Amino acid sequence: MSTLFISDLHLDQSRPDVIDFFVNYLTSIDKNITSIYILGDLVEYWVGDDDPAIGLEKTFDTLHRVSKVIPIYFMQGNRDFMMSENFCSKYGIKLLNDPTIISLNEKKILLMHGDTLCTDDIKYQEYRKMVRSDKWQTAMKTKSLEERLSIANELRQKSMLETKDKSADIMDVNQNAVNDAFIKYEADILIHGHTHRANIHNIKVNNKKVQRIVLGDWYQSAFFLIYDNGKTIINKQSLMFKKDRNS
């Protein structure tokens, strides 16, 4: 029995080859995979349940088909936080809270998208608080689809410009925030994405050996984490389709 973890695919019509790769992967997924966890940023942006999802139709159709055989869990990221529970249910996907605790092989595993751990980026945390508020999202839903798509594009452009001016350390997790998460949830393993810094960190928190696993993005390589009977297996496959990298 194996559990698959992925995040930060950022699927978008501008990268159809990556969409095809993901669809083909799901179609021929290993029979040992018994559950799939997508920890945010499945798509590049999402403006509501009426999002046209241009170019993503076969992605959701395939997820729906696979979900009838393998449970699929999805956690909202900083790009697709407006993907609702109703939308997920339509395609057989179970929406998770961020954070969520699961248990595998007697290990307590904490799942997060990861952006809440980047507490040094004060400007981003303020932005996150705003867009996750009921007030902001309610106001967004009153706007036309065209207006919301325009706003999403403006926010993406702004994010790319601001990212260029930020130091690498600010955009990474804060170790104190990581430690606090381990302590609060009494976790053995923390799995998250968002930072695009794929790695396995073996650390100690309050003299307890724990592990923080950072999932990779899907820009230059497709990154898969498979947790198989207590063993962590990382697979990467090169994506030689597009060199542009967003954050």
Image (cartoon, grey):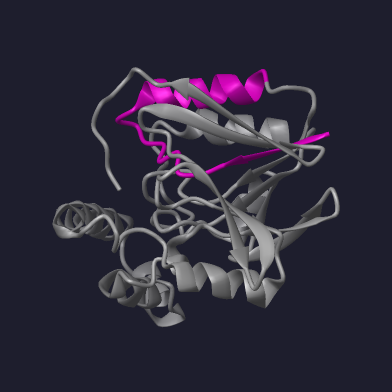
Q: Is residue 163 left or right of residue 34?
A: left
Q: Looking at the image, which is closer to me, 247 or 105?
A: 105
Report x, y in % for residue 26.
Answer: 63, 26
Query: Looking at this rendering, what residue extends furthest in the front direction?
Result: 207
Whether residue 92 is situated above or below residue 209 in the rendered picture: above
Residue positioned 69% across, 31% down in the render: 65
Q: Is residue 139 visible?
A: no
Q: Is residue 31 left or right of residue 36?
A: right
Q: How many numbered dots are placed on residues in this image?
A: 0
For residue 6: magenta?
yes
Q: Looking at the image, which is closer to me, 186 or 103?
A: 186
Q: Looking at the image, which is closer to me, 85 or 198?
A: 198
Position of the N terminus, as image quadrant, is: top right
Report x, y in % for residue 40.
Answer: 51, 51
For residue 16: magenta?
yes
Q: Looking at the image, which is closer to me, 161 or 179?
A: 179
Report x, y in % for residue 57.
Answer: 49, 32
Q: Quadrant of residue 174?
A: bottom left
Q: Is residue 157 left or right of residue 7?
A: left
Query: Looking at this rendering, what residue extends furthest in the bottom direction?
Result: 135
Whether residue 226 is situated above or below residue 243 in the rendered picture: below
Residue positioned 36% across, 58% down in the render: 172
What residue span does the magenta drawing correspond to? 1-28
Q: Is residue 17 left or right of residue 247?
A: right
Report x, y in % for residue 169.
Answer: 29, 59
Q: Is residue 133 visible?
A: yes
